Each structure stands twice: as C-alpha cells, then as structure tokens.
Image (cartoon, rainbow, N blue to C red):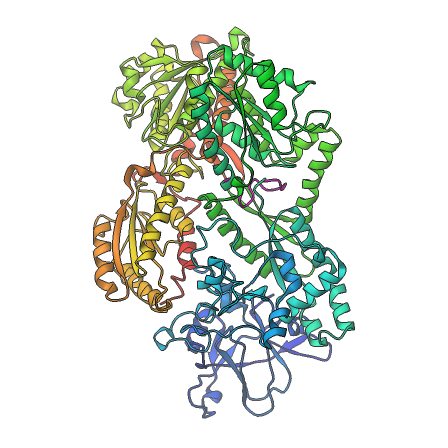
Amino acid sequence: MTSEHIKKPTKSGRLDDVRLLVTCSASKGQPHRSAESLKRMGMVKKQSSEALSSGRSGLQPYLLEDISGIDHEQACHSRKRIGGAVYLGQFSQDTSTATWTPHTPIRLLSPAIDDTIIIDLEAYYRQNEDRCPNTGILKGCEMYIVREGYEGLVKGNTEYQMATGFDEPSTTSSALPGSIPAAHSGTSASILNSLRFGDGNLLKEGTGDHAGGRTLKGRYIIRAGWDDVRGWFAEGGTLIGTARSDVFRTPEGRVTAAHNLIKEGIDALVVCGGDGSLTGADVFRAEWPKLIAELRSQSKITEAQAEEHAHLKIVGLVGSIDNDMSMTDMTIGATTALHRICEAMDNINSTASSHSRAFVIEVMGRHCGWLALLAAVAGGADFLFIPERPPKTMPWEDEMCEAIQHHRKVGKRKTIVIVAEGAIDKELNPVRAEQVKQVLSERLKLDTRVTTLGHTQRGGRPCAWDRILPTLQGVEAIAALLEARPDTPSYMIGIQENKITRVPLMEAVAMTKAVEKAVKEKNFEKAMSLRDPEFTESLDGFTATSVLVYEPCLPPEQRIRIAIMHIGAPAGGMNAATRAAVRYCLRQGHTPLAVQNGFRGLLDDNVIELSWLGVDTWMVRGGSELGTNRTLPSVDLGAVAAKFQQFNFQALMMIGGFEAFSALLILEEGRKNYPAFHIPMVHLPATISNNVPMTEFSLGSDTSLNALVDACDAIKQSASASRNRVFVVETQGGKCGYIATMGALATGAALVYTPETGISLDMLRKDVRFLKTRYGLDEKGHSEGRLVIRNEVASPVYTTDVLTRMFKEEGGTLFDARSASLGHVLQGGIPSPIDRARAVRLSLKCMAFIERHHSLLQQQPAKTRQATGESAAIITIQQSEIEWVPVQEMVKHADMANRRGKNPWWAGIKELVEALVGRPALK
C-alpha cells in the first residue's frame, strides 16, 4: 500500500485527489507530535495560510501531499489490521475534527469535505524503520498471546467473560494507556501505550491459573505489553503453554476459533510449532472466508466485522527440537536439545572410558535423525542409527560389530552408539536400544549400558543460538505479516547457513512429509536428498571420522603430506577440526603432520605425525592441543621455507583467526621467492572474535557466545536480586564487536558499546537519560537488573571503570552500578556442539580443497610448478553458501589496521539490540 497520496472516493469506488489539512495536538494518553515533525517525515508539503486564520487555538494546520492508488473498499476494511496503518474519519461541510485510534496522535481537519476520507499513515512507521525493527509493538501493532496453542484459540476468553461480565481484568499499572506519566510524554506512544497489561508475571511465574487475585483462569487470548515479555530470553520451554487440540481439527472448532479472533480484533497469527501446527494454520487461513460466512449467517458477527476481517494473515516459525522441517537449516529449540545431548554424552564418555564400557544412547527423532547425527559427530560416537540412512547390510548387526571391533583392536577403551528414536533397518524394522545392547554384550562381550535421555532433551535454558535465531526470525515474521496481501502465500520463516529466509509454508510441509514417504518406500537416497545439504555433509563427515580403515582409499602417487598448524589465540573447535582432518587423511592415505606451537614451533622442528587413536578424545577438548601463538612467518620467511622443504610439506592447513589470515597472505606473497610455498594452503577461521573478513562465522565464536550468555545470566540474576542495579560487563573481542553485539542480543542487554561505533560523551549523555527513563517506567518494587555490555577496546578513554562510576553517580536513587570483566573465560571450556559439528564439516571441505589443488599441481612439470592464487584461500560462510575466497581477494575486504572485516553482516544488530529494549523510543 502506498503512502504518498490522499484520495476522495468517487462513484466508481476509486479515489480522486483531494487536499487535506492535518493538525497535530496532544490528546489524553497520547504524546504531542508537532506538525513540524510530520513535515520532516515528508508527509507535509506546505502550510495553509487560510487555515491559520481559522482561529482554532493550539492547532497548526498543514497540507498533505495528494495521494493515489488506494482502493476505497479495501481501505475501509483495514482499520484494525495488524500494522494499524489505515484509519477512517467523517468530515462535514463545516470545519471539524476526527479523533483517531490510539495508534497515532494525529488529528485531521478539513474545511470543505463531506465524504469519508481515508489516509494511509504507513509513512509514519516507515520513517522509523531505520532505527526500529519490524517488531509488533514498535510497528504500532496490538500484540496478543494465545495460551495453550489451538486449544486456547478455541476456548478464547468466553469462560472469563461469562463468569465476570468483563472482557479482561482491570489494570493498575502506573504507565499504561491513559495514565502515562507527564515526565515521559516525549517518548514513543507505541511503547508507552503498550508498556504492560498486567499478565506478564503470571505467565512467567506459572501462577496464571491461581484462583485468588488477578488470574488467567478462563482467559486464553491475552493482550501482551512491552514489559510483559521482559526477561523471557533465559526461560526454557514455552511460558504461554502448548497443547494438542482435537477440537480445532473439527470444522466447529475452527468456526469458534475464528469467532474468538474477531471478537478480539485480531486478523494476523504468528504460529510457532511443528509441521502439524503449521499445516493447521494454513488450513485455517484457507477456510477463513468460509468461516466468516458461517459466522455471519449465524449473526454472530456484524456485516462490518465480516468486511473488516475478510482476510487472515499467517506466518509460521518452526519450533521443533528434532529439526525435522525441510527448507530450513535449523528449527527453534534444536540447538538447545543438541546441547543437552552432548552434555550427557560428555559425562558418559568419562565413565565409559574409565570402565572400558559400551554405552547405547537413545535420543529423540521419530522421523528425523538430525539430533542423533549431530550428536554422533559432535560427541565422537562409534556407530549411528537414523531413519533416513539405515545400515546398508542385513543383518545390521554385522556392520556395527565389524566397525566397533576395528576400534577396539587399535586400543580404544570406550564405545558409544547413538540410536535415534525412530531408527530402522533397511527393511523398515525398528532398531531399539535394548537390541543394540544385547548384540554388543553377546557378540562382542562388552560391558554395555543403555541410557535413554528422554525429555531431558527438551529442558533447560536456551543456548545462545536459540535466543538469537528466534529473535531474528520474529523480526522477519512481523515484516512478513505487514507485507502480506490476500493473494500472497503463508510463509514459513527459516534460515539457510546465516540468511533468514521466507519460504511458502505448505511447500516446506510437503517436502517434510515427502521425506517420511520416501523412507516408508525404502527410497533412502531420495530421503537424504530431501534433507538440507548440511545433513548429507554431516553424515559423510561422521563416516569419514568414525570408520577406521586398514587399506587407504587413494593409491600411493596421490597421497599427500599435509601440515596442520594452529595460529593466534585458542578457540573452541580447533581440536575438533584437527581431529577430523587427521582421520580423513589416514582414511585417504595422506600423512597428517602436526606443527606444534605455530611457526615458532616449526622453526624449532616441533613437527609430529598424528595417529587415528591419538586424536580420539580431541573432539570435546577446548583450547589448542597443538599449541598456538601469534608469531607470523615473517619472523624469518627464508627459514620457514627451508622447514617446508625439510619436512616435505605438500599442503598446509592453518586453523586460527586474523593472524592465520595474515600468515596465509605472507606465504602466498612469498611464492615469488620461495618455491616451497607453491603448495595448496588453506585457512580455516577459528577465533572467538569472529573478525576474519568475509566469513560470517568462525570456529569458537559460538562457544564464546554461550560462555558469555551463561556468565551474563548469572550476573543478571544478581543484578535483578538488587532490583535496581546495572552491571557493565566487559568482553573480549579485540577491535571487533561481534561477541559484544551478539551477546547483547542473546541476553537482552540494555546497551552495548563496540569499537566500530566507539563511545562519545554525547552518546553517554543519551544513554544515561535512557536508563533513567527506563527505570522510571518500572513498576515500583519490580525493577529489573540490567546489563550494559562493553567490548574491551570500545574506547581508550571511557573504560569499563569509568562507565561504571558514571552510571553509579548519575543513577542517583533510581539505580546502582557494578562491573564484571569476563576475560579469558570466554576462550576456554568445552566447545559447543555447533562449533564441533561445524569444525568437522569445514575441515573436511578443506581436505577436499587440498586434494583438488594438489591434483592440478601434479599435472604441471615438477621443476616449473606454479601454484595459482586460488590455491591459497580461506573457507568462508556467506549467507546461504560456503565460499572459497583467495587470500588476495580477501585483502580487499579487510580493515588491516583494525584487524577486522570492512562490512560485517552483524553491523545492524546493534540497532536491533537497542530497539528491542526501547532505546530509540524512550527518551
């Protein structure tokens, strides 16, 4: 819908040009917005001198630009659409005003118009898009929560209304519509008018059905305010409840659900669930016109309501720990469930090794083996059963026993077998954990135990990615609803690598069901092809790193001596990547050479050959088992070249951060003078700072984010216990603000300071004013502790100590301030499952890259071999693709002085962080 024109309806139903006078004044419960501000928005073109003489005190008339392209019938039915962008008003021959809905403080004044006038105020919201995300309240939407899923949609609020005679309980908050404190009259109406509606704590504390006092009993469709959902980041499960609904599956149930939505004035739904929930949502939308007609025929709604709610908008977010939805790489909850599984596996590993036992671990996944597969990759399992790819032989017992026997023969003391809940053999017979235990005990004589993790996989605090992903997808969901039209499909919000995507909901559901169908038809190749590419690559990675072969795959002339080196600061996933590379090398027949302690170690001849068993336990180890430092080859490039020749390096794999990138650049440029460097050389980014240019993720960044989230959750708990305390948390990251910014998004921090934006006195003045305003709006006795996250080098002047003392001084009686420096805590610990799995996947791609470019070099005469620029490259993740970037090309995108990329993908996240806490709106 356009917003540049205003029209008057003609007899044909279209709108002709009219000129409309707009005045601005304050009204009860709404802040004043001057006509000058509308003028700055581009909505006001010139002032009317005639109107100025009208004598109406306090009104400043202005002319709006004439408008075209709005259909009158469509606009008339849009008054309560989710964005609140279209409004109606009646104007008589004499000068009069029309008071608008609470979404906007604008009033209209017209001296000579007697027809209905339509004005599209979408421009008002669009002018704020640069600093406000497309989230519901910030976009002027009324937001509601439906308790207990579709069951709550059918029940609605009828029970409460019949029992009390009221639509909803009264609200006594001091900062609600109609009672906004005068001190905050300059802030955004969209937040202040929807600050809180009194039910947030009932939902969070689980006391909603308590009979005494304010209650949610009998109320299932609840208005939600800004503060009502504050602090939900760290809560597991679903605070609003979920339930399977048999009654919604019936036509009568859906008619009732439609009636409940119309009664509340709702015409858009965000549905978070699995394929069943999303299918139900699409069916609901498809039936909507028929449901409206039936309600109208029963006189349950008026003709005006039927016209106003002629269309239902739907968008789907996939909430499933199984990660079983096609056309998206990740579903909400899957990563946290994987964390729970890997935590259990890590604990089991120690006892299995101590007693030389075998453990069979059953995980969830009735129709999808993603959890089992990623757990097997990240946990270093020995064998795996998933629905999409059963063992190739029958009986499966032979294949499993042969693999495990090989592992035991080389000295492995423990055995881990992962069984998905829906695991089958190639004849579709179920494979149960107890069956596997019996085979291991009887045929291999192993002391075997079974562990069924069950619903522990669903519990616990969300990990960092399960806070970030739903936030980004939620923003996109609101954008999709606001842009939806009757002829657009219902969308599912997904993700591919690092790109938030919209895909037609039913296409994703159909592809998901096609996987189940292919499995039932024993077409396992098709089932694998219907999964996302990462699924197939992860399975290949598991095979490459878990199967021990006695005969290498490649002939002797194709085998390579590959050097593996860690450069820079340690990061989670370095050891996992090394383990994957070593085991792939041994499988192919290559020689894996570990260079200990980086280039300094190479010059000291610290080079060893690694074995299959020697790296077995490296998957779960943090830090760097090879040892690492920041020394670059430029320390003595000639001596480094000599060592390359001495150890006959035929390829080099460097795992590290910006130092590894710099080292690769030095070596590539050194090819002009040193033939030893004419070999394939790759860089696998691994740094908690995530500062390598062009790649959106580095190994270790997810581990560091989770360490930051865990620490901040504990700090915030302390801050909240004090009710009015601000904690300034200092993070690592060098001159790259990735960890600080994404950590702020994952923890709901109030402010974040990064090197990219720096800190100025004017910025601090505004931030102090914001904190005062925010604490002033809190309910008395219910203030919440808040976090301010600062990168360690955000400013050389405004240090963490300076900020803390300043906030403490300026907070006065409103809030106190403390500081916490996380330091090297962010580097250590067990790598996250995502960093482990990503390390395996990217490491194997590095090996394939080396093999490909080594083969091309072998085709050249031995004495004149010249490696191309493409043979010295960095593996990167760019939106939905994995790309190889030659090192010389990457230099163009690097800020070498500040050791970071020039245009990081997360640069706009800081604005999102601030918008989600109301920083731009609360002044």
| The one of 90 and 6 positioned closer to us in this rendering | 90
Instruction: Residue 245: give x, y in percent of width and height.
Output: 67, 55
Q: Is residue 444 magenta?
A: no
* Horizontal arrangement in the rendering, residue 7 relative to residue 58 (left or right): right
Say how many tags the image has. 0
Q: Is residue 674 above or below residue 62?
A: above
Instruction: Residue 406: give x, y in percent of width and height.
Output: 54, 12
* Residue 872 shows up from this direction: no
Q: Which residues are magenta?
A: 323-335
Assign the magenta stretch its main secondary structure: loop
Instruction: Residue 665: give x, y in percent of width and height.
Output: 36, 27
| The one of 738 and 647 positioned closer to us in this rendering | 738
| The one of 690 and 14 positioned closer to us in this rendering | 690
Question: Split into 4 quadrants, where in the image is the N terminus?
Answer: bottom right
The residue sitting at the front extreme is 212
* Residue 448 shows up from this direction: yes
Q: Is residue 326 magenta?
A: yes
